[in-house]
Image: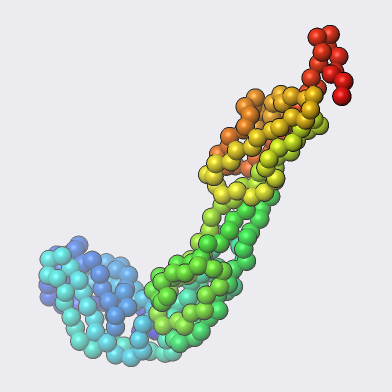
Amino acid sequence: GSSAGGTVVTISGENLGDGSDVTQMTLCGAVASIVSQSSTQVVVTAGPALVEGLGDVRVFSTSFGESVSANAFTYSGTIEMQWTVVSAHGAPTPAAGTQGVEPGTTITNAVTSPDTVGTTQYVCTGWALAGNVPASGAGTEVVVTVTNHATLTWLWTTNYHMDAAAGPGGSIDQAPGWFAKGAAVSIAATADAHYHFTNWTGSVESFANPLELTMDAAVAATANFRPDLTSNSVPIPW
């Protein structure tokens, strides 16, 4: 069959299974997709080759365990490993998707971070690699020598923007910035002399001071203040 996979292969023999309990088939070590099965015949679609040339056919069933036919299948043509990149955010290099590469190819993988979309920011925390080594790591770049079919997944966390400000007559103790999703943020408002705090307005409406937030979304809040008044409603003079 072609080293790229996709060849439909029929395996015939005794006691391959009970007609429904074949759980896996491999051709030269590469897992094949089962199309149909009976107790004497299994039809599969060959997967991409792991090695070039002649190899064993192995059938695994619940009833009979492992059945092996030695040197019964041959992959032909140049072997290509499937290198798959998965990324929910950013602009990865190579791009998200699957490409075929020759065994032993060295690939420098990178992704742009952070990826900011309005008031939401996605930050790459590292990567996970299935099917090849190394298995995982931190950072936004990894160099891999491809020896197997493998999937590289870029990992992300989410930040939300907190935009807090003070109106005339006071100040707050937090500058605008990015905070991790789920983070607890406390913002205290302090009135200037002859002013007093009244409330928060914006995406959050509150009379509490300090304002206690859980960053499950972006926040815009303004601390409002009013002048202190005399008994006849005249602002207290400075």
> Could you say which quadrant of the image residue 215 lies in?
top right
Q: Nearer the viewer, residue 79 or 19?
A: 79
Which residue in the rendered view is the most extreme toward the front? Answer: 238
> Could you say which quadrant of the image residue 40 lies in?
bottom left
- Placement of the N terminus among the 4 image quadrants: bottom left
201 vs 56, left or right, is right
Is residue 142 visible to us here?
yes
**Count of numbered tags:** 0
Q: Nearer the viewer, residue 6 or 91?
A: 91
The residue positioned 58% from the left and 34% from the top of the image is: 212
Q: Position of residue 122 (x, y in %)?
A: 59, 56
- Vertical relation: 72 (above or below) 123: below
- Vertical relation: 168 (above or below) 28: above
Q: Position of residue 151 (x, y in %)?
A: 45, 70
Which residue in the rendered view is the most extreme toward the top? Answer: 232
Q: Position of residue 108 (x, y in %)?
A: 55, 79
Give the image's coloring scheme: rainbow
- Placement of the C terminus among the 4 image quadrants: top right
58 vs 7, left or right, is left
216 vs 58, left or right, is right
202 vs 22, left or right, is right
Q: Nearer the viewer, residue 71 or 149?
A: 149
> Could you say which quadrant of the image residue 18 lies in?
bottom left
The residue positioned 14% from the left and 71% from the top of the image is: 65
- Vertical relation: 89 (above or below) 160: below
Q: Position of residue 84 (x, y in %)?
A: 48, 71
The residue positioned 60% from the left and 48% from the top of the image is: 179
The residue positioned 42% from the left and 75% from the top of the image is: 134
Is residue 216 visible to us here?
no
